[in-house]
Amino acid sequence: MSELSVIATRPPFNESLFANSLEDIRDAYGRMLLSVCDNPSVNGDYNVTWTASLYSHTVKEWSSSECSTSFIAPHQGEFTISVQVQSVDGRNYGKSSIIVRDIWIAAVGDSFASGEGNPDIERGLNNSAEWISFHFSYLACTGATVESGVLGPRGKSQMDVLKEITRERGMGPDVLMLSVGGNDVGYAEILERLQRGETEVLVPLYFDFSRNERGEIDASCADMHNIRTADIAMAERRVLSRLNSLILKTGREAGWTVEERVPGVFSRGGICSKHRLIRLSQTANIFVDLTNQNKH
């Protein structure tokens, strides 16, 4: 009798990383591929009995005449896979602990989110954690608007697909990326007019919404929803500063008017500032209600 080595891999087992439907999620979510084929003692005629356990409780037991099989874990967690191979030479056993962790990432919106025109690049997942399986719901498409694509038509929208997968999974996406609005305001038509030189262009720089009344990064108020100060600082350094530099450079080259004073206006008026200049959604709803009351 010899101890068997159990090899387990997580999806994707093929070239596709996308899970754009409920069927795709059901096929890959929690699935692991199990194999004892590399063991020298597994040869000739044999029967394999597999047992999957979670917290010492048997989840599933099944048999096969092949040295490999697949198993869909009903829960996330650390599973113990036990295997017994019965052949003419006797019985051999093996056991392995396998952590099942699935991460669902969804992208919805228009061509900005879909990457229209971006070149294909090689996937950089070679250094990803061994048992983590990523599922991408890449639903964004060119031409989508809020009402036609993201939220509608009913039963066929991007959000309908997300809701369907959420019900199956029991929770929403771990990461949700959304970019929409360009088509709603006629982005293509605006670009066409700009290219013809018919419109004077005014481009404001982006402002930092995290600055308090002292001009410091502040994530202490409830409206920041537990965003870490370190993450805000990194975003300001790696995203906001670079983006504003690019806008300034491109705007000047194109002969546009770049409004550089906007960040300064908000430098002490962020979300957590005592002198906040940013209107949150709940505040905006109050103004809408007051406006509607005044009409009657």
Image (spheres, rainbow, N blue to C red):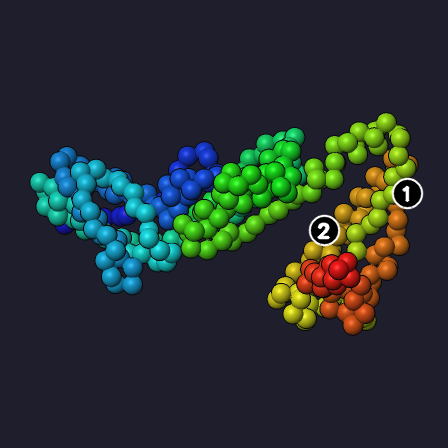
Image location (x, y in percent) of residue 118: 64, 33
Query: Hey, what amino acid is under mark 2?
Result: Val
Image location (x, y in percent) of residue 120: 59, 32
Is residue 209 shown to the viewer in this render?
A: no
Q: Which residue is mark 1?
A: 257
Q: Give the CA distance from mark 2 to mark 1.
A: 22 Å
Which residue sits at x=30%, y=46%?
71
Which residue sits at x=38%, y=56%?
76
Image location (x, y in percent) of residue 267: 82, 62
Q: Is residue 27 above or below residue 294?
A: above
Q: Quadrant of the C terminus?
A: bottom right
Query: Which residue extends farthest front?
Result: 296
Image quadrant assignment for residue 283: bottom right
Image quadrant assignment for residue 237: bottom right
Is residue 116 shown to the viewer in this render?
A: yes
Q: Is residue 282 above or below residue 107?
A: below
Q: Secondary structure at mark 1?
A: strand
Q: Is residue 224 above or below residue 151?
A: below
Say which of 199 and 32 sits in front.
199
From the viewer's perspective, tell me whether residue 218 is left or right of residue 4: right
Badge 2 crowding class, 10 Å Cα cut-off, few under 14, some 14 to 19, many 20 or more, is few
Image location (x, y in percent) of residue 241: 77, 52
Q: Which residue is mark 2?
A: 239
From the viewer's perspective, tell me whether residue 97 is left or right of residue 261: left
From the viewer's perspective, tell me whether residue 17 is left or right of residue 89: right
Query: Hey, what amino acid is under mark 1?
Result: Thr
- Asked if the residue at tag 1 contacts the one at tag 2, i.e. Cβ–Cβ closer than 8 Å, the answer is no
